[in-house]
Image (cartoon, rainbow, N blue to C red):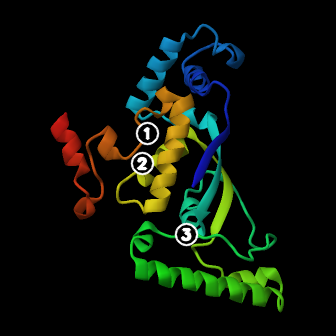
């Protein structure tokens, strides 16, 4: 898996702080970033997050290039609808000898890995044969969820908070959890104050909403506090 932050709103924390100031200031929009020190920006960001006042964060967005992930992952990712996506097309891109993602649980079992690899080889051959008989857009119907895909994804900070809350959770599916963790590392590197508390509720609040399915991490966090 490869995740790269390729674009984001310039000076993201100052932009979010300026948007918040507009709600309570008579100043013009162009003047709102003036006179704000880095310490004041961080203090205001922390206050907004503690209050749950996240609408100013919607003015800040981050764009990621994502490679080496499966279609099974992308099907989960697009459920986060307040975002923009561009994905490699299986209609226009030739998928002969398509790459695929093998889950670690299968890779750890030699017999399971053998079955998986053979099935991928069979599907690759079937796709090649079908592509010679019917349009590629129809041959793609036999491509598996394991098929590798690439995409570009853009989310604003508020959407990323929701994404990290759900997908950094230990109960999230392993592949999208890894993606979420890597995306969080990328944004924390450029906007640490904005994303200091981004993640599952057990990390930030010591609360878990999974009920009987809880992994117990929230109790661990509360016991440390």
Q: What residue is disc 2 on?
A: 165
Marks 1 and 3 in Cβ contact (< 8 Å): no
Residue 132 in the figure: left or right of residue 212: right
Which of the image's four quarters has the C terminus? Answer: top left
* Residue at 35%, 60% in the rendered image: 171
Q: Is residue 55 visible?
A: no
Q: Is residue 7 above or below residue 2?
A: above
Q: Is residue 135 above or below residue 97?
A: below
Residue 153 in the figure: left or right of residue 175: right
Marks 1 and 2 in Cβ contact (< 8 Å): yes
Q: Earlier in the sequence, mark 1 or mark 2?
A: 2
Q: What residue is disc 1 on?
A: 198
Q: What residue is disc 3 on?
A: 72
Residue farthest left in this picture: 223
Measure the C-alpha gap from mark 1 to mark 3.
Answer: 24 Å
Element assignment for label 3: helix
Which of the image's four quarters has the N terminus? Answer: bottom right
Q: In the rendering, at what x and y percent does residue 91 appear? A: 78, 74
* Residue at 70%, 89% in the rendered image: 126
Q: Nearer the viewer, mark 1 or mark 3?
A: 3
């Amino acid at each position: 898996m490869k995740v790269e932050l390729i674009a984001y709103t310039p000076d993201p924390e100052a932009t979010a702080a300026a948007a918040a100031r507009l709600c309570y200031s008579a100043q013009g929009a162009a003047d709102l970033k003036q006179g704000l020190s880095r310490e004041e920006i961080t203090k205001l960001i922390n206050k907004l997050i503690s209050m749950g006042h996240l609408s100013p964060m919607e003015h800040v967005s981050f764009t990621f290039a994502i490679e080496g992930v499966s279609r099974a992952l992308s099907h989960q990712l697009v459920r986060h609808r307040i975002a923009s996506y561009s994905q490699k097309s299986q209609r226009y891109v030739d998928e002969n000898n398509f790459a695929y993602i093998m889950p670690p649980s299968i890779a750890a079992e030699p017999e399971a890995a053998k079955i998986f690899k053979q099935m991928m080889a069979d599907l690759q051959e079937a796709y090649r044969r079908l592509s010679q008989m019917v349009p590629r857009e129809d041959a793609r119907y036999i491509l598996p969820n394991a098929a590798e895909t690439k995409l570009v994804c853009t989310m604003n900070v508020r959407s990323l908070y929701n994404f990290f809350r759900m997908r950094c959770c230990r109960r999230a599916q392993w592949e999208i959890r890894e993606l979420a963790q890597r995306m969080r590392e990328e944004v924390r590197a450029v906007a640490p104050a904005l994303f200091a508390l981004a993640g599952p509720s057990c990390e930030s609040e010591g609360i878990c909403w999974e009920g009987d399915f809880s992994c117990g991490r929230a109790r661990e966090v509360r016991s440390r506090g």
